Amino acid sequence: MKRLFVFLCTLLVVLSAFGAWGTGAWAEQDTEPEWWWKKDKTVQEQPPLKGGPEKDMRDLTPVNNNVLAEQYPGIVFVRGPGDANRVALTFDDGPDPDYTPLILDVLKEYDVPATFFLMGARAAMNPELTKRIDSEGHEIANHTYWHPDLVEEGEVDILVEEVNRTEDTLADILGYRTRLFRAPYGFLYEELVEELDNLNYSVIAWDVDSLDWEDLTPEEISENVLPIVVPGSIILMHDGGSPETDRTQTAESLRIIIPELQEQGYEFVTVSELLNIPATMEEAQ
């Protein structure tokens, strides 16, 4: 009987201590528990897209880039020459510390170059990742600082500020000034194109949209690309996006897209190589 009493008392002490830890020590923590689905995400949230998530914007219809390319030949490009089996992979909205490294790893595995249109705000937050893109032989280009909808903003001064701030940021990190520009969402109109020409930029659009911003599977992304690629194609993909975006599927889709196009005889080059234009302001002088 005595042994039973001692056992019950001991059990009561243990349970009380456990209850105190469960309601006290845990409750005193300032941060929420790191659930399994959050473990691979960076703690530091990246700057948002000022104009909003890609999938919320694409239904809008500003001036079509094909029309602008016809109006401004040699300034606006949607594809390259069709006389050689060469194509260019392009990635927007980075650098993102979660997904850009995944994409860089796949590109390195296949020894394929690409062109990355970087947001200035994200490059400023991730300078070492920006340097990695450059050091691994990829091309870096301007995608504005905050990713606004330039058509909705409707002011040339905002374009100039966004472009120059991004260029200053990239120059501080890389030591040179880029010369290729892509508008957020691809949205531009005539006056903005003319100002970009005054600033000595080439405007790069695309003729193949992977639609990876629709949160598709790798197979669905590749199906949006492979059937419509032609010699000279510029392929649009993303290594960043809004905070809830997951670009893992984009990285995985490259393992389908790259070998299939190589099997078809295509060579991957940067945008400046595809179009035979200067990639930096220094080269253009």
Image: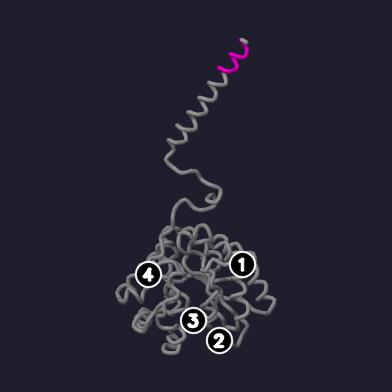
Q: Is residue 196 left or right of residue 22?
A: left
Q: Which amino acid type is marked by label 2? A: Pro
Q: Is residue 92 left or right of residue 150?
A: right
Q: Which amino acid type is marked by label 3? A: Ile
Residue 27 horizontal/vertical position (percent): 44, 36
Residue at image mark 4 = 148
> Label 3 vs label 1: CA separation?
32 Å
Residue 110 horizontal/vertical position (percent): 64, 67
Category of crowding for the residue at label 3, using alpha-carbon neighbours closer than 10 angstroms: few (below 14), some (14–19), many (at least 20): some
Residue at horizontal 32%, vertical 70%?
161
Between circles 4 and 3, the one closer to the viewer is 4
Between circles 2 and 3, the one closer to the viewer is 2
Category of crowding for the residue at label 2, using alpha-carbon neighbours closer than 10 angstroms: few (below 14), some (14–19), many (at least 20): some
Residue at image mark 3 = 277
Q: Is residue 105 left or right of residue 213?
A: right
Q: Are marks 2 and 3 in contact (CB under 8 Å)?
A: no
Quadrant of the rendered structure where residue 60 is? Answer: bottom left
Residue at image mark 2 = 81
Foreground residue among 129 and 280: 129
Q: Earlier in the sequence, mark 2 or mark 3?
A: 2
Foreground residue among 23 and 202: 23
> Label 4 vs label 3: CA separation?
26 Å
Residue 157 horizontal/vertical position (percent): 29, 74
Asked which secondary structure carries label 2, the reply is: loop
Q: Using the image, tell me which numbered label, if any, was put on residue 218.
A: 1
Q: Earlier in the sequence, mark 2 or mark 4?
A: 2
Q: Earlier in the sequence, mark 3 or mark 1?
A: 1
Q: Check if residue 6 falls in the magenta segment.
A: yes
Query: Looking at the rendering, in which quadrant would you find the C terminus?
Result: bottom left
**Magenta highlight range:** 2-9
